[in-house]
Image: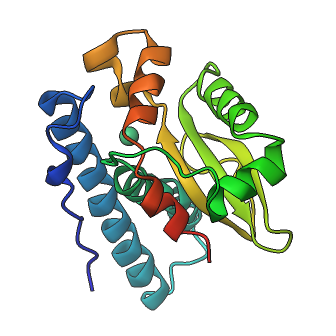
Amino acid sequence: MAYTAKDYTKLIGMEGFSQTLLNNHFTLYQGYVTNTNKLTDALAAMLKEGKTGTPEYAELKRRFGWEYNGMRLHEYYFENLGGKSPLVKSGVLGKMISASFGSYEAWEQDFKATGAMRGIGWVVLYYDVPTCMLVNVWINEHDTGHLSGCQPILVMDVFEHAFMIDYGLKRADYIAAFFKNINWKAVESRIK
Ligand SMILES: [Fe+2]
């Protein structure tokens, strides 16, 4: 059964993000959902038809992770936006950040520095389940650099489409706006 794109229009009106930018971003996200569904169907059909030993099958299999992560990372991203209040530093997540990075400030510095890196991709704050530690990771495009066994906690899009309409080349200003709108409750709820 086809997966349905989620509706994030409640984010419209968020400070520092224009309606044009958000609507374009929602449309891009819907494209990843459409293509993930298309690939799922195409791969299932090829399996049924005995076409798995073909270059076409191999290339679609490789492509799947790119489209799927493009879909899912956008969902994490939109769902960790729209917040109004800062992180409670004495809470569970605040304490984990301090334990992993030394302080909240050190974590924020590292997360922002990762987001300022040249290139297109994502910054993911991961919760490493086996060790209960947190780590900031750069994801190239959508699919390169994910850490197995880790749960994404906070996700930031640093593809140019995420900020250029509103900020041009000023990526740091976009990152500052992102930080003002983090939904820390949603972030904390991802720690299981
Ligand atoms: Fe995006």
Task: Report how many numbered discs are placed on residues in the image.
Answer: 0
User: In the rendered view, does 52 fall on the left or right side of 40?
Assistant: right
User: In the rendered view, does 10 fall on the left or right side of 182?
Assistant: left
Residue 86 location (% of width, % of height): 46, 44
**Camera-nearest residue between 140 and 16:** 16
Q: Quadrant of ligand 1?
A: top left
Rendered position, 53 above or below 152: below
Q: Quadrant of residue 58?
A: bottom right
**Camera-nearest residue between 98 and 112:** 98
Quadrant where the C terminus sits is bottom right
User: In the rendered view, does 132 fall on the left or right side of 79?
Assistant: right
Q: Residue at the spot x=43%, y=90% of the render?
A: 48
**Camera-nearest residue between 17 and 32:** 17
Residue 125 location (% of width, % of height): 64, 50
Rendered position, 179 above or below 11: above
Residue 67 location (% of width, % of height): 44, 56
Q: Residue at the spot x=34%, y=77% of the render?
A: 41
Residue 82 location (% of width, % of height): 30, 48
Residue situated furthest front in the rendering? 90
Q: Quadrant of residue 72?
A: bottom left
Residue situated furthest top in the rendering? 169
Q: Residue at the spot x=39%, y=67% of the render?
A: 39
Quadrant where the N terminus sits is bottom left
Residue situated furthest bottom in the rendering? 48
Rendered position, 189 above or below 142: below
